[in-house]
Image: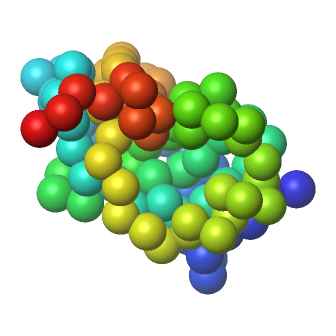
Amino acid sequence: MGTVVGDRDIHDLPLSQWGQMSADLVGRVVEVRILCVHAFGVGVELTAQGVYGHVNSPRVTDGRFTIEETAKRIGEVKKALVLAVDPGRQPTLTLRPSEIPAS
């Protein structure tokens, strides 16, 4: 069971509604808003790009990932690193501070 803000659980949307993201963003740091939290990870919205992405649970924090603690972050805007953009799949990112290059 996960936690969402309002009705914004992006994991319920078909992939076609996630939006298109350029592969040029791989390796770049972007701003994301945390929308939903589940045992398998976190759904985010890339604020400048207007598309949705996913953060696998091991890449949410440098510490221990828990739904309860991460759910407190729903709605927050964070820095994230884009790891992969593959056609037909959700973009994947990391929120782990140790993996995000300093600005």
In-front residue for pair 97/52 = 97
Q: Residue at x 88, y 56 (%)?
A: 1
In-front residue for pair 54/99 = 99
Report if residue 25 is visible in the image: yes
Quarter residue 97 falls in: top left
Q: Residue at x 21, y 20 (%)?
A: 27
From this viewpoint, which residue is outermost toward the right?
1
From this viewpoint, which residue is outermost toward the bottom?
6
Report if residue 46 is visible in the image: no
80 over 48 or under it: above or below: above
Q: Report the side of 91 relative to 72 (left or right).
A: left
In-front residue for pair 103/56 = 103
Where the C terminus falls, by quadrant? top left
8 over 38 or under it: above or below: below
Q: Where does the image place residue 37, in percent across and percent down from the top left? A: 67, 55
15 over 47 or under it: above or below: above
Q: How is the image coloured?
A: rainbow
In-front residue for pair 90/35 = 35
